[in-house]
Image (cartoon, rainbow, N blue to C red):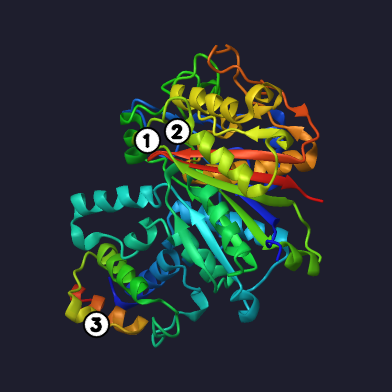
């Protein structure tokens, strides 16, 4: 899976799992402010990412995921894409 | 100073026989059952395989997708019913902090997020504790229906929750009435919801020997007051009422469906599930409601019974009605709309209060369907199988719950 594919999959997840408006999703969009995902929503999103991509994101790494692009970075690094 | 009067200005329902007030009432009028084989999950391994399911419910017709996704089904039901009730009332307090601070909610549920509880434990056992949804707690706590309508509709005043099993939403309506009477609010959303139809829920009630086991005849299984009744039928849904201080409603020209005249509570203090034989507890709640209303017992023209179709409830409730009304009990039409809806548990009192208000407004009494075999111990006029025209100005609605809780409302026709 390359970066573009990961980005596309993540976008689908954000729309289907969290009900986020597709037009607001951009690499620099912040979950809590731009996308209005609350702290519980972020936990749910990270779990969905783990399930979707078959990766594990420990809490200490999760703390540094604030934007869509940062989430993609973490998955890319884990999958070595 | 005269006591503040409480009227009903908005109604909303999600039920097994209709997801609008009009559809619900049309079904009750025509004696239509909403009971059928369970489709929400595979019930083939259970002793009871039928229930009253809500059909064609689309939560996103009432709320945005993100909100719907994080809610339990019981919470979605109550929110959807409240969207209808607030529209009916013509009230929008979301950008009105002054009005909103004088508005609140009391919402009942027997259990809360039964399905979410089951699913959360399933996930924990099969996938591990770190796979449980972060929304597990907020889905299962029974007060979240009250919290969510407060958030969604800008209700900034008294907002709370009642958990008294099958009496919960009758208690909610009564408690909300008292909040308005004492001046703590002018507008209250009141009612209740339940969504218990999951493997854990149905199996739990079946083990308590509370349910009918007529799997071969779901639509005929709920037969309140009939000699062959064998238990209640679990259902899901919600009823929401907008209650309003009368002068407040009149000042804004609101449409008035009826009035909450009286509220009575008592406890059996007897057994965890069985009613006290003879119906003393239920009778004391009926008397308390009549006393509170200032209405004489002779004025009650219709009783919407708790009428669960369990052997114990129906005979006890009949005895209680005779204790309170004496010989006149035989002249009062008493019907159980649960014969059509099944038992919405914590939602029952609200949808039945709504049925009672609509009956008075429409000049008819809804029937008790599936009534065929008279029980010598249940010998009142149960309005068997067909609706009846009746000019009713004041009516009573009974609700009783596991734990021995008895809650009775006295309701009045508008005008």
Q: Are marks 1 and 2 in contact (CB under 8 Å)?
A: yes
Q: Name the chain letter of the residue that bears numbered label 3.
A: A
Q: Nearer the viewer, residue B71 or B322?
A: B322
Residue A16 location (% of width, % of height):
44, 64
Residue for badge 3: A63
Is B413 above or below relative to B318? below
Q: Are marks 3 and 2 in contact (CB under 8 Å)?
A: no
Q: CA distance from mark 3 to mark 1?
A: 41 Å
Q: CA distance from mark 1 to mark 2?
A: 10 Å
Identity of the residue drawn at 77% across and 37% down: B392
Residue for badge 2: B38
Quadrant housing the N terminus of chain B: bottom right
- Assign a secondary structure to mark 3: loop
Identity of the residue drawn at 29% across and 75% down: A2
Give the number of the disc on residue B202. Answer: 1
- Assign a secondary structure to mark 2: loop
Which mark sits nearer the N-terminus, 1 or 2?
A: 2
Label 3 crowding class (10 Å Cα cut-off): few <14, some 14-19, many 20+? few
Of badges 1 and 2, nearer the viewer stands 1
Identity of the residue drawn at 47% across and 43% down: B266
Is residue B247 something that shows in the picture? yes
Q: Nearer the viewer, residue B82 or B34?
A: B82
């Amino acid at each position: 899976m390359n970066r573009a594919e990961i980005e596309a999959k993540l976008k689908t997840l954000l729309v289907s799992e969290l009900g986020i408006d597709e037009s607001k999703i951009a690499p620099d969009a912040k979950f809590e402010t731009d996308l209005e995902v609350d702290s519980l929503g972020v936990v749910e999103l990270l779990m969905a990412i783990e399930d979707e991509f078959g990766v594990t994101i420990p809490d200490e790494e999760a703390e540094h995921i604030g934007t869509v692009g940062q989430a993609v970075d973490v998955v890319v690094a884990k999958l070595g894409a | 100073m005269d006591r503040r009067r409480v009227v009903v200005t908005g109604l909303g329902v999600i039920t097994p026989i209709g997801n609008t007030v009009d559809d619900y009432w049309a079904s009750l009028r025509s004696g239509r059952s909403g009971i059928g084989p369970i489709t929400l999950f595979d019930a083939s391994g259970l002793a009871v395989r039928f229930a009253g399911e809500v059909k064609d419910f689309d939560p996103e017709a009432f709320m945005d997708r993100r909100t719907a996704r994080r809610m339990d089904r019981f919470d979605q039901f109550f929110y959807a019913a409240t969207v209808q009730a607030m529209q009916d009332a013509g009230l929008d307090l979301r950008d009105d902090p002054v009005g909103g601070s004088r508005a609140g909610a009391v919402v009942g549920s027997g259990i809360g997020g039964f399905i979410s509880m089951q699913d959360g434990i399933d996930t924990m056992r099969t996938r591990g504790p770190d796979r449980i949804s972060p929304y597990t707690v907020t889905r299962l706590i029974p007060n979240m229906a009250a919290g969510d309508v407060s958030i969604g509709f800008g209700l900034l005043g008294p907002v709370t929750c009642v958990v008294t099993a099958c009496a919960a939403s009758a208690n909610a309506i009564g408690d909300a009435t008292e909040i308005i009477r004492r001046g703590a609010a002018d507008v209250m959303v009141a009612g209740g919801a339940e969504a218990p139809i999951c493997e854990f829920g149905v199996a739990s009630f079946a083990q308590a020997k509370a349910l009918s086991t007529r799997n071969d005849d779901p639509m005929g299984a709920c037969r309140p007051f009939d000699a062959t009744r064998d238990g209640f039928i679990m259902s899901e849904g919600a009823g929401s009422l907008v209650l309003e201080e009368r002068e407040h409603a009149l000042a804004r020209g609101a449409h008035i469906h009826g009035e909450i005249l009286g509220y009575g509570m008592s406890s059996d203090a007897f057994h965890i599930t069985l009613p006290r034989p003879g119906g003393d507890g239920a009778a004391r709640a009926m008397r308390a409601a009549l006393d509170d209303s200032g209405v004489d017992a002779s004025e009650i023209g219709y009783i919407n019974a708790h009428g669960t179709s369990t052997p114990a409830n129906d005979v006890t409730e009949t005895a209680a009605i005779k204790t309170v009304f004496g010989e006149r009990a035989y002249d009062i039409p008493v019907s159980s709309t649960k014969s059509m809806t099944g038992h919405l548990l914590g939602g029952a009192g609200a949808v039945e209060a709504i049925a009672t208000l609509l009956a008075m407004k429409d000049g008819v009494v809804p029937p008790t369907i599936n009534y065929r075999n008279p029980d010598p111990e249940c010998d009142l006029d149960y309005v068997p199988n067909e609706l009846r025209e009746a000019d009713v100005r004041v009516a009573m609605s009974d609700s009783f719950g596991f734990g021995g809780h008895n809650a009775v409302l006295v309701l009045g026709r508008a005008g």
